[in-house]
Image (spheres, rainbow, N blue to C red):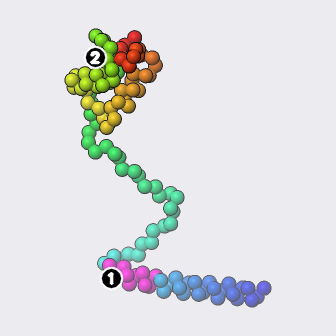
């Protein structure tokens, strides 16, 4: 038992001496870099989370009409295909916030059965 206590005390003293030597060396490095105080960051990796940068680079586009209202307006007179609808709402001045406008159009056309589809041509119910 006394041997293990002696071993522990020796190990502890060795670690304390190594710590002091490292602190002296770190102070030398800090002085060479021009940093006045020693700062060691705490190791809390799980608490640190990187914030993903926003993909938007500019202001969000605001349209006078919602996409649904624009589709209703252009398909009111006659049934149209998706491509015709996209062209017609572009003429109205509607601008999409996405690189894939067909996806947004599909969500409007197929949501809640608000448009009827006859042979690939859509019109309001």
Q: x, y (%) of residue 92?
A: 22, 22
Most extreme residue toward the front is 119
| Numbered mark located on residue 32 in the image | 1
| Residue 32 painted magenta | yes
**What secondary structure prevails in the magenta region?**
helix
Residue at 26% in and 39% down? 59
Can see residue 66? no
Residue at 42% in and 81% down? 26
- What's drawn in magenta, residue-wise? 23-33
| Numbered mark located on residue 86 in the image | none
Q: x, y (%) of residue 66?
A: 31, 23
Q: Which of the two discs, 2 and 1, labels the residue nearer the N terminus?
A: 1
Q: Nearer the viewer, residue 86 or 56?
A: 86
| Numbered mark located on residue 74 in the image | 2
Most extreme residue toward the right is 1
Residue at 28% in and 10% down? 77
Find out whether the residues at labels 2 and 1 contact each other: C-beta distance under 8 Å.
no
Q: Nearer the viewer, residue 8 or 104?
A: 104
Image depth: mark 2 or mark 1 in front: 2
């Amino acid at each position: 038992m006394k041997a293990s206590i002696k071993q522990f005390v020796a190990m502890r003293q060795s670690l304390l001496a190594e710590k002091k030597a490292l602190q002296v060396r770190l102070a030398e490095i800090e002085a060479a870099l021009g940093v006045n105080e020693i700062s060691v960051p705490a190791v809390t990796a799980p608490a640190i989370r990187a914030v993903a940068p926003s993909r938007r680079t500019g202001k969000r586009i605001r349209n006078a009409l919602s996409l649904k209202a624009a589709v209703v307006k252009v398909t009111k007179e006659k049934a149209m295909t998706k491509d015709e609808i996209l062209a017609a709402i572009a003429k109205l001045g509607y601008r999409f916030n996405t690189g894939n406008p067909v996806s947004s159009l599909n969500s409007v056309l197929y949501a809640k059965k608000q448009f009827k589809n006859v042979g690939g041509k859509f019109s309001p119910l």
